[in-house]
Image: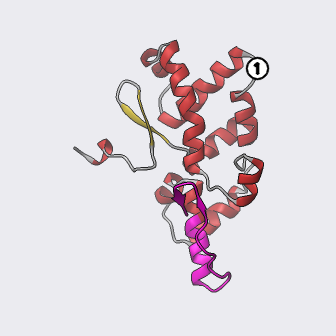
Amino acid sequence: MNKMDTFDINDVVYNFDKPRVLKFTMQKIFELEMIYGSMRAAFDSFYDKDAGKQLLATEIFLQILLGLSIDEIREIMDAHNLTEARGKIPLALETSFSKTEENKEKNNTPYEPNDWDWIYYAARYRLLMSDDEFWGCTPKRFEKLHYLWCVDKGLIEKEPEIFYGEVSY
């Protein structure tokens, strides 16, 4: 089994033509924001009442998340597994973003457009991440690393662990 065949315990894996990971990395969020303007607008389209808009948004999400063309997605998917895969996308979003108390109370995930200049600066010059490390990490991982950097530098005090169900961060 090579590295491409192994998955992280928190990965959302779906069997298309082969097992594939659905994960919202910084690169994939950036691409969706370039298309829709914000993650909120992307998910508004994903949940639109118009079935045609839902289908197109699902195909765009899968195209970006899987790195496949629309034609490749249509080739490996029928209506049944497209609907099933559509159900995995919100789960992938949930595993990629941190749950703060504020978002937990609102029962949503932060969707506002990102300040990519600031995020990239913090990743490269504070956290010393390479381009590949930055664009491949999830917002949850970036937030945790930046939080630990701030604690290490004495900018903030370490907060006690917060538990949401069985998961802590």
**50 relative position to 95: left or right:** right
Q: Is residue 160 magenta?
A: yes
Magenta extent: 144-169
Q: Nearer the viewer, residue 16 or 87?
A: 87
Q: Nearer the viewer, residue 159 or 22?
A: 159
Measuring 69% from the left and 40% from the top, which residue is drawn there?
34
User: Which of the 4 quarters of the picture holds residue 154?
Assistant: bottom right
The quarter of the picture where the C terminus appears is bottom right
Q: Which residue is mark 1?
A: 49
The quarter of the picture where the N terminus appears is top left
Residue 112 shows in this picture: no
Measuring 61% from the left and 71% from the top, which residue is drawn there?
147
Instruction: Examine the rendered structure and indicate whether residue 1 appears above or below residue 78.
Output: below
Q: Position of residue 63 (x, y in %)?
A: 53, 30
Instruction: Examine the rendered structure and indicate whether residue 105 appears above or below residue 75.
Output: below
Identified by mark 1, the residue type is Lys
Q: Position of residue 51 (x, y in %)?
A: 70, 15
The residue sitting at the bottom extreme is 154
Q: Nearer the viewer, residue 55 or 168?
A: 168
Instruction: Examine the rendered structure and indicate whether residue 98 appears above or below residue 71.
Output: below
Q: Position of residue 48 (x, y in %)?
A: 75, 24
